[in-house]
Image (cartoon, grey):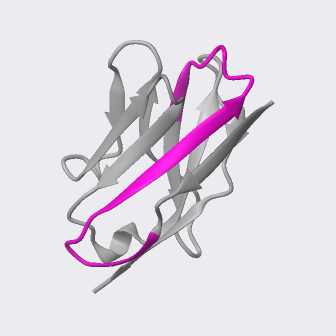
Amino acid sequence: QVQLVESGGGLVQAGGSLRLSCAASGRTFATYDMAWFRQAPGKEREFVARIYWSGRGTYYADSVKGRFTISRDNAKITMYLQMNSLVPEDTAVYYCAYRRGNTNAYDYWGQGTQVTVSS
């Protein structure tokens, strides 16, 4: 089992910044990648960004490219999401996800952290 704990959400004005963290614990000996997803009220969960645990590959949704930066700390088994130039459309619950291999679905999910951007 892998446990994921997100933190860093909150209320921010448009144009502001937040940094989310996701700490993984448990059986994390075979991490393939980790990712951030988000779900806004009344909408389906959507992909935000992911980072491979080996190498330097990162991927972003078009809606956040140039504004969000995903990073990791291998020693702490922690993933981050630096969110800049936030807009009200970024308001959502943000979830981190963990995957052991290149499969279609992520194996473990965090409980989510609320991000609210006011206009």
- Tell me which residue sits at (35%, 72%) in the image: 89
* Image position, residue 85 (x, y; %): 20, 64
Q: Residue furthest right?
A: 1
Which residue occupies 65% across, 20% down?
100
Residue at left offset 60%, top offset 19%: 31
Q: Quadrant of residue 56?
A: top left
Q: Is residue 28 above or below residue 109?
A: above
Left or right of 44: which side holds 84?
left
- Residue 106 visible: no
Magenta span has 24? yes
Q: Name the image quarter holding residue 45.
A: bottom right
Q: Residue furthest bottom?
A: 119
All told, the count of numbered labels is 0
The reply to whether residue 102 is visible in this rendering is: yes
Which of 93/40 is in front?
Answer: 93
Left or right of 18 in this view: 48:
right
Where does the magenta region start and end? 10-34
- Give the percent coordinates (x, y) of residue 26: 74, 29
Q: Quadrant of the N terminus?
A: top right
Quadrant housing the C terminus: bottom left
Q: Is residue 60 magenta?
A: no
- Image location (x, y in percent) of residue 15: 19, 72
**Above-or-below relation of 62 to 105:** below
